[in-house]
Image: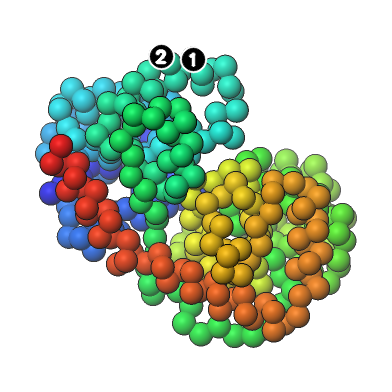
Amino acid sequence: MKICFITEYFDKSYGGQYFAVKNVMEICQILKINYSIIFKANKNFIDRKRLIKEIQSSDIVYIFGGWTVFYIKMSVLSHKLKKKIIVHPMGFYEPWSLSQKKIKKTIAWYLYQEFFLNKADLIHCASNNEMLNLKKLNSKLNTVILPFALDKKDIKKKINDNFRKKCIFFSRLHKKKGLDKLLQAWISVNDQSWQLDIVGFGEKEGYVNKYNTSKYKNIKFLKPINSKKSKINLLDKYDFLALPSANENFGIVILEALARGLPVLTTNQTPWKIIQDQKAGWIINDSLIELKLALHQIFFLSNNEFYKRKKKATQIAKKFTNEKIAKFYLKAFKNVLSL
């Protein structure tokens, strides 16, 4: 079996899209499945003959994304070459995403996007939330839920009881991620004993200027992190992750934080209800008031309460190792080939 991955961009600065593709590649390595990748900046895309050869030599074409001209071209070519196609929508059809540039996306949906999703052999949804939202758009889509995963070596083995009073926001600096709300809530609560560090690619200057962070000594913007080792070392310096996102189809950084023993503060617009159920963090509505209240609660927790949540966090992460999740991907691949 050989899989050809197709994604418009394959760069760490694109956050979840890069790590989603990378994760499925790692699962293919575990399953001993051959694969190649096509994206805008690589030779497989630039050289037309090479592009066709790569797709022709593959059993499955695995497309990440939607909407763009790149996506249309790759979908048309893959269908023309009569390949089995899996599409991972990357959360592009979630309610929040559809509300952005709504008229343009509505037109695109009826012109071509629904057609290409309907023609795909399988739609890979990262969570039950994503599947339900897609089914509301088109109940006939053939979907499967395949969560993302991580290397079991990345899960912290020993949780210490160090208490630093430090919170991290680690994601793209984008309005969807709730950074505006987090900064407003943090400034409003105004507990100078707690530090908020913000890490991610994006429009840093806009946030710095808007909130005049030079006034607030307990808010810092750090340089974006590239390597996995650097990310692990960074996460180990904090007590909890805050990601009050307006929408996540999965939220890979949430899993990465849990793996390092960080309780997570996020919203019910992410598919991580298990965090609340297992007492490994805090789930709130997408609300500034609730975010302020949650921060107040967190800031008054004892060291022992934080320690309990840290242990629960790693226990959740152990359910999402590549080895445990790989069998579900293999089943999906075999089902597609049998169609």
- What's the coloring here? rainbow
Regarding residue 252, the answer to whether it shows in the image is yes
- Mark 2, Cα crowd under 10 Å, few <14 / some 14-19 / many 20+, is few
Q: Looking at the image, which is closer to me, 273 or 259?
A: 273
Residue 111, numbered circle: 2
Residue at position x 59%, y 35% from top? Answer: 96
Could you say which quadrant of the image residue 140 lies in? top left
Could you say which quadrant of the image residue 273 lies in? bottom right
Q: Looking at the image, which is closer to me, 70 or 251?
A: 251
Quadrant of the frame with the C terminus: top left
> On the rendered structure, is 240 left or right of 67?
right
What amino acid is at disc 1? Answer: Ile
68 in relation to 335, above or below: above
Name the residue beneath numbered marker 1. Answer: 107
Q: Picture coordinates of residue 265 (x, y %)? A: 66, 60
66 in relation to 311, above or below: above
Cβ atoms under marks 2 and 1 closer than 8 Å: yes
Regarding residue 58, the answer to whether it shows in the image is no
243 in relation to 206, above or below: below
Q: Picture coordinates of residue 327 (x, y %)? A: 25, 60
> On the rendered structure, is 139 left or right of 285?
left
What amino acid is at disc 2? Answer: Leu
